[in-house]
Image (cartoon, grey):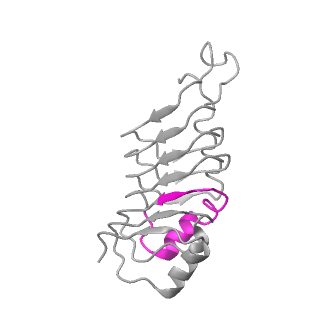
Amino acid sequence: ELPAAVRNLSIVGGNLTVLRAAAFAGGWREGGEGGGAARPLADLTLLVLTHDAIEALEEAAFAGLPALAPLDLSHNRLRSVAPGAFAGCAQLRTLRLNQGLEARDARGLGELLAGALANLSLVRLELAGNRLRELPPATALPPGLRHLDVRNNSLQALAAEQLDGLAALGRPRLHLAANP
């Protein structure tokens, strides 16, 4: 049970496995189960869900968190992300998925993220430490992205098509350190 005025929430080391629709939108009910109306967490601006064994984000998993700006899902095992998992997160600007994805190639990453990021206004996307061999397809990235962090992966070369795709997004700053 959380007070409605919560601004920062960290859940680290839990066993959440699947985040269902509106997982954090209910807040708490005054008087316990069946009591007054659920209070949404409308003021929640920072959510950290690291090392929580999360494998799936269902449709609208973060619905009801309109003020959420940074979201950290690092160090999980994401295998499934619904196209509308981040629906309702109009203020989401930073998404951290460092060492948190099961996809190991561009196609798998593109499929994992397809549609989920398209309607977001992300400024920063962090994909460090995911053993990626290629950049994610530009079609899987949100338009207007300013920083793409793919440090500490397995990137060996960048194809002209990949760089052209990034240029079409507005030329985000690409962080490539610790890649072969």
Closer-to-camera residue (18/155): 155
Asked if the stretch drawn in magenta spans residue 5, the answer is no
The count of marks equals 0
Residue at the far right in the pictured view: 37
Q: Quadrant of residue 34?
A: top right
Residue at the far bottom in the pictured view: 160
In the image, is residue 87 above or below residue 64? Answer: below
**Residue 84's x, y, as percent?**
66, 54
Which residue does the image show at 41% across and 48% down from the upper left?
53
Which residue does the image show at 50% across and 46% down from the upper left?
71
State left or right for residue 119 relative to residue 157: right
Which residue does the image show at 55% across and 37% down from the upper left?
45
Residue at the far top in the pictured view: 31
**Residue 50's x, y, as percent?**
40, 45
Which residue does the image show at 57% across and 78% down from the upper left?
165
Which residues make up the magenta segment? Answer: 102-125
Q: Quadrant of residue 168?
A: bottom right
Asked if the stretch drawn in magenta spans residue 107, the answer is yes
State left or right for residue 83 relative to residue 7: right
**Quadrant of the rendering where the C terminus is positioned:** bottom left
In the image, is residue 147 above or below residue 26? Answer: below
Closer-to-camera residue (77/70): 70
**Residue 111's x, y, as percent?**
56, 69
Closer-to-camera residue (57/50): 50
**Residue 110's x, y, as percent?**
55, 71
In the image, is residue 96 above or below residue 161? Answer: above
